[in-house]
Image (tube, grey):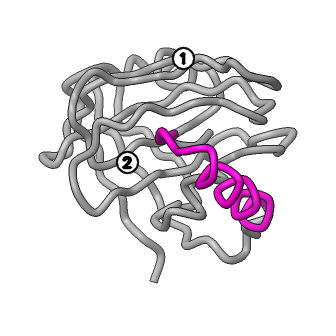
C-alpha cells in the first residue's frame, strides 16, 4: 500500500518515473522493528519493516505476493497526516491500524488489492502519525480495536 497525493499531469510523469525507480525499495534497505499492541486479549506483536521516507511509503507492499504471518509494515510520518492510502499494485489483502500522536489507534481499515485505476482510497477519518499493515483480519482476530495503544520499537 502507499499513500496518495494529487499531482498535476506534468508532475504525474515525474512521479511515475520516480515510482518505477523506487518501487524496488529493497527489503534489506528498510529499517526493522517491532510493533506492540496491548489489548484485552493480551499483548500482540508484529515484526515490521519501517517505511519512514517518502519513497518507502510510496512503494509500501506493492508487488509482494505474500506477507509472512506475524509480520507487517509500519508507515511513519514526521507530522500528523490525513492522507488517504490506496492499494494500487498491492496484491495482498491487508488490514491497517492507524495511530495518533498519543499512540492510540484511531481507525482500523480492511483493504482489498487493486490492479488498475480507479482504485479506492482508504482514509482513517482522523489525523494519524503512523499506520501498520498486516495480513487481512490480523487485528480483528486478536480483538484489537480503536483506542488500543501502539508502540513501535526500532531495532538497534
Magenta stretch?
4-23
Quadrant holding the N terminus: top right
Q: Secondary structure at mark 1?
A: strand
Provide residue 6's location: percent of width, then percent of height: 48, 39
Question: Is residue 42 depicted above or below 75 in this figure?
Answer: above
In the depicted view, which residue is nearer to us: 44 or 27?
A: 27
Question: Which residue is identified by label 2?
Answer: 36
From this viewpoint, which residue is outermost toward the left? Answer: 102
In the depicted view, which residue is nearer to us: 74 or 36?
A: 74
Question: Is residue 119 depicted above or below 129 in this figure?
Answer: above
Provide residue 20's location: percent of width, then percent of height: 80, 59
Q: Is residue 36 left or right of residue 111?
A: left
Quadrant holding the C terminus: bottom left
Q: Secondary structure at mark 2?
A: strand
Q: Is residue 50 left or right of residue 68?
A: left
Around disc 2, counting alpha carbons within 10 Å, would you say few (fewer than 14), some (14 to 19), or many (20 or more)? some
Pick whichever of labels 1 and 2 is earlier in the sequence.
2
Query: In 3D space, how far apart are the residues under numbered discs 1 and 2 (Cα atoms)?
Result: 19 Å
Provide residue 46's location: percent of width, then percent of height: 52, 47
Task: Report if residue 69 lies within the magenta region.
Answer: no
Task: Report if residue 22 lies within the magenta region.
Answer: yes
The tag on residue 110 is: 1
- Residue located at (70% from left, 64% from top): 18
Question: Is residue 96 depicted above or below 43 in this figure?
Answer: above
Tell me whether circle 1 and circle 2 mark residues in contact (CB < 8 Å).
no
Amino acid at each position: 500500500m502507499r499513500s496518495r497525493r494529487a499531482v498535476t499531469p506534468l508532475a504525474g510523469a515525474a512521479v511515475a518515473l520516480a515510482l518505477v525507480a523506487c518501487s524496488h525499495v529493497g527489503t534489506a534497505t528498510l529499517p526493522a522493528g517491532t510493533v506492540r499492541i496491548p489489548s484485552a486479549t493480551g499483548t500482540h506483536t508484529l515484526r515490521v519493516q519501517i517505511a519512514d521516507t517518502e519513497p518507502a511509503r510510496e512503494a509500501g507492499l506493492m508487488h509482494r505476493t505474500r506477507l509472512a504471518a506475524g509480520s507487517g509494515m509500519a508507515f511513519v510520518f514526521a507530522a500528523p497526516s490525513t492522507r488517504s492510502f490506496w492499494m494500487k499494485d498491492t496484491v495482498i489483502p491487508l488490514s491497517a491500524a492507524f495511530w495518533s500522536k498519543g499512540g492510540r489507534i484511531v481507525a482500523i481499515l480492511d483493504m482489498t488489492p487493486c490492479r488498475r485505476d480507479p482504485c479506492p482510497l482508504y482514509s482513517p477519518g482522523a489525523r494519524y502519525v503512523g499506520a501498520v499493515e498486516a495480513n487481512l483480519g490480523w487485528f480483528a482476530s486478536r480483538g484489537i480495536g480503536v483506542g488500543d495503544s501502539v508502540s513501535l520499537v526500532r531495532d538497534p
